[in-house]
Amino acid sequence: MEGKKTAGRQKIPLKKIEKYVDRCTTFSKRRSGLYKKASELVRENDVDLGIVLTSPTEAEKVYSFIHPTHNAVIDRFMNPTQEFDLGEHLVAENTRKKVNQLNDRLNELDRREKIAKDRMTSLSEMNKTREKSRWESIDQLNADDIMKFEAWLDVGEVMLKDQLREASSSSSQSPPKDADI
């Protein structure tokens, strides 16, 4: 069967990305995705988690995601069967609570940002349609409609000039010299 199409995402083989700029960009995106997944894992399963990454840049910048605290994660790794001491457990619980609150706030802000972007896109499309419709409707006028529209504009011009005269006579100032009265 020629031209077979697949729906959805395709698996890309994991291999080193040769182009430096592409590698840095991919690292940044994947790091963000990894942090998001780690945060979900912590929230949903109440686990202690530590991730340490070094960037592919020359500076070898180090990034980390540690929850609840680095001491709690290291202690859990070094002594997996030993219980937390009470102080460390309270710190971990407090940290977990703060992280959950911040995650909730971040999710709410993401939701609001998406709504605002969707609204801006919708308003932009409405403006484009409105402008297009306005000129299309003028283009569709016949000769009689054009004469009526022109007469309506002339009446509006006369009314505006009358209002300008009234405003000028009611105030002590004279109209500007360049006013067409």
Image: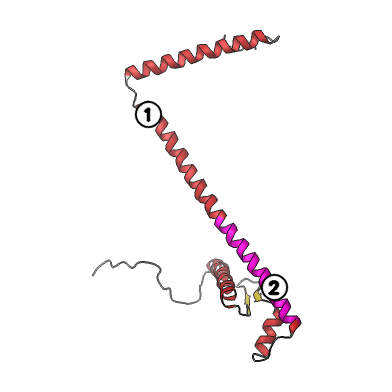
Q: Secondary structure at mark 1?
A: helix
Up-down relation of residue 41 to residue 126 (above or below): below
Q: Nearer the viewer, mark 2 or mark 1?
A: 2
Which label number is shown at residue 137? 1
In front of the other: 55 or 172: 172
- Residue at image location 33% in from the left, 17% down from the top: 144
> Whole-percent x and y of residue 1?
23, 70
The crowding category of the residue bearing disc 2, from other C-alpha atoms within 10 Å (few below 14, some 14 to 19, many at least 20), is: some
Region rendered in magenta = 87-111
| Residue 112 shows in this picture | yes
Q: Is residue 95 magenta?
A: yes
> Whole-percent x and y of residue 173?
70, 10
Residue under label 2: 95
Amino acid type indicated by mark 1 = Ser
Up-down relation of residue 165 to residue 93 (above or below): above
In front of the other: 86 or 32: 86
> Whole-percent x and y of residue 181?
57, 9
Residue 88 placement, left or right of 60: right
